[in-house]
Amino acid sequence: MNLQEINELSKNSELRKRVKSAILVAATQISGEDPTTVTPALTAIQAQKRHSRATLVINSAQKQAEVFANAISAQPGLYSTIQIGENDELVYEGTGTLDGDIQFTVNSVWDDVAGVSYEDKQP
């Protein structure tokens, strides 16, 4: 997939609808997480940034779906399994499920979108 195709994928309405659902699932889980029981344990700043992004998602899921769609569309593990069909539908060629891959990728980029840096993760 080239850069133009990644851009088109990030703007796909079906992808954004699925991403909206995935970020809401992640946000509700993150909102209630205990930073001391997550493995590895979260630092205070990491937990704060993750929780702040979760609150943004819950309060403005539509806008945040756009942000996350941009982030996950650039992930090779996702864009290598999805194509956009002739009628703008998503064609999934992965081994799991499209929803599972989207949820996994949203969870994987959460800290990046939340602005968690390497230094924020240091005890």
Image: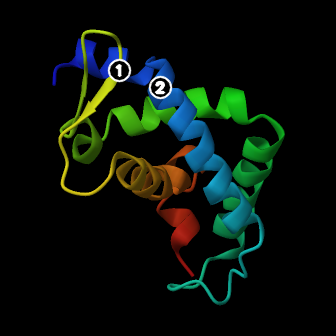
Which residue is pictured at 67% across the width and 59% down the height? 50
Q: Could you tell me the amino acid type at mark 1?
A: Glu
Percent x, y of residue 25: 64, 56
Q: Which residue is mark 2?
A: 14
Residue that sits furthest to the front in the current view: 87
Task: Identify the mark nearer the N-term, 2 or 1.
Answer: 2
Mark 1, secondary structure of its residue: loop
Question: Image quadrant of residue 100?
Answer: bottom left
Q: Residues within 10 Å of mark 2 (few under 14, many from 20)?
A: some
Dots 2, 1 in contact, CB < 8 A: yes
Depth check: 120 or 54 in front? Answer: 54
The vertical placement of 38 against 7, above or below, is below
Which residue is pictured at 58% across the width and 85% down the height? 41
Percent x, y of residue 46: 64, 66
Using residue 91 as the reference point, say whether residue 113 is left or right of it. Answer: right
Which residue is pictured at 54% across the width and 53% down the height? 110
Q: Could you tell me the amino acid type at mark 2?
A: Glu
Residue that sits furthest to the right in the current view: 59
Give the CA distance from mark 2 to mark 1: 7 Å
- Residue 89 circle label: 1
